[in-house]
Amino acid sequence: MFSHIMIGTSNLDRAKTFYDAVLGTLGVPPAHVDGHRIFYRTPAGVFAVSLPVNGEPPTAANGGTIGFACSSPEQADAWHAAGLANGGITCENPPGVREGAKGKMYLAYLRDPDGNKICGLHRM
């Protein structure tokens, strides 16, 4: 359904450090830097971070979350720990199992250094 997801940042170097660490736990190679943007390319799609092209400050989506697929609860925990170690802030509940309409899921939520809400998710 999606070709790519792009979010904004106020500091490209800080965003690259954060996402290289977090996405590295999922086996995603470090970002390719393209001027004012960074790209993480995978067979499943592209995740990108950009300085806003209009020169205005970036904003985090209110009510928005970007979820990253994890292969196990342990990988979700490593994802979360890498985020905390690189400037992220835990949000919502601590990482753990939650019941959803589709069954049990292991969820780990963070806010990146720009306030974007992201989630490491493993469907059990």
Image: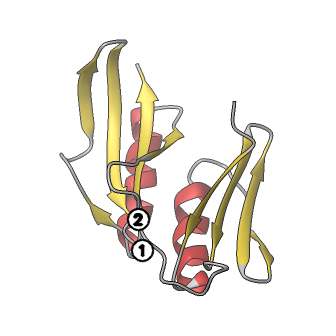
Label number found at residue 60: 2
When asked about the image quadrant of residue 108, the answer is top left
Q: Is residue 28 above or below residue 50?
A: above
Label number found at residue 114: 1
Q: Position of residue 8 (x, y in %)?
A: 55, 70
Residue 30 at least partly seen? no
Q: Secondary structure at mark 2?
A: loop
Q: Are marks 1 and 2 in contact (CB under 8 Å)?
A: yes
When asked about the image quadrant of residue 59, the answer is bottom left
Q: Nearer the viewer, residue 1 or 86?
A: 1
Q: How many marks?
A: 2
Q: Is residue 44 left or right of residue 5?
A: right
Q: Amino acid at mark 1?
A: Asp
- Please identify the quadrant where the N terminus is shown: top right
Residue appearing at x 20%, y 49% in the figure: 92
Q: Position of residue 105 (x, y in %)?
A: 35, 25
Q: Position of residue 82 (x, y in %)?
A: 44, 63
CA–CA distance between discs 1 and 2?
7 Å
When asked about the image quadrant of residue 29, the answer is bottom right
In this view, the mark in front (1 or 2): 2
Local crowd size for mark 2, using a 10 Å CA cut-off: few (<14), some (14–19), many (≥20): some
Q: Position of residue 56 (x, y in %)?
A: 52, 84
Q: Is residue 31 above or below residue 68?
A: below
Q: Earlier in the sequence, mark 1 or mark 2?
A: 2
Q: Is residue 104 left or right of residue 60?
A: left
Residue appearing at x 26%, y 29% in the figure: 97
Q: Nearer the viewer, residue 27 or 87?
A: 87
